[in-house]
Amino acid sequence: MPERRASVIDQLTHAAAEWQARVVVPHCPRCAQPCCLLGSVVLDLDWRRLRALYRVEEPQRAFDQRLAAGHGPAHIRKQGGTYYAHGQPCPAYDAATKRCSVYGTATKPPSCTDFPVYRDGDGITADRRCEAVELEALQRDLEAATGTRLRAIPDDEFPELVTLVPDQRRDKARSSS
């Protein structure tokens, strides 16, 4: 049985992860506004990671009650089953070395791995708040890696977010000629 070819979005996801490892991650130590400072970026966490990163000793229920009563850390909020940290540096961030102490471990939040380029539905979203993101270069690299023409769609509500999606208009025009 022949191997099934990966879908275009799977190819784009893989190419985006490679681009991020090659372009974004090496830029982090010289970044002027590290996302780990959580000034313009929000860190989303599950209970296990929140507990590990913020060294929470009390049971989840007690912590949640303190948060709900307004007596928890002011920079942490909970919505549904997710905790959000914003406004103070991530405790895993070492400002002197500009490195993460949990990088490459199970404690590292998935959103840190994904930021600033990640799969979002049928496209790849780039967050231009990251100074390493050069949208046109990313688009060219993804197109070259996948052989797929892409169209950039800015988010109406959050202009710093742009999603690159396969440009089916061009594909249809090419197949009909």
Image (tube, helix red, strand yellow):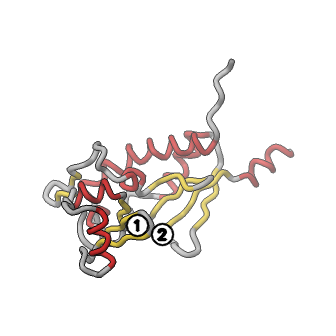
Foreground of the two, 157 or 30: 157
Which residue was labeled with disc 2? 160
Three-letter amino acid code of the residue under disc 2? Glu
Tell me, for residue 129, which label it has, or none: 1
Report how far apart the C-alphas of labels 1 and 2 lie in the structure: 6 Å
- 152 over 8 or under it: above or below: below
Q: Position of residue 87 (x, y in %)?
A: 28, 74
Q: Is residue 147 above or below residue 73?
A: above
Sequence-wise first label, 1 or 2: 1
Residue 71 x/y as whole percent: 24, 79
Disc 1 crowd rating (10 Å Cα; few below 14, some 14-19, many 20+) is some
Residue placed at 21% from the left, 61% from the top?
A: 56
* Kind of residue at disc 1: Arg
In the image, what residue occupies the spot 54% across and 63% down? Answer: 162
Q: Quadrant of residue 95?
A: bottom left
Q: Residue furthest top?
A: 1
Image location (x, y in percent) of residue 63: 27, 68
Viewer-side residue, 78 vs 10: 78
Q: Measuring 55% from the left and 56% from the top, which residue is drawn there?
A: 120
Question: Is 98 on the left-hand or right-hand side of 110?
Answer: left
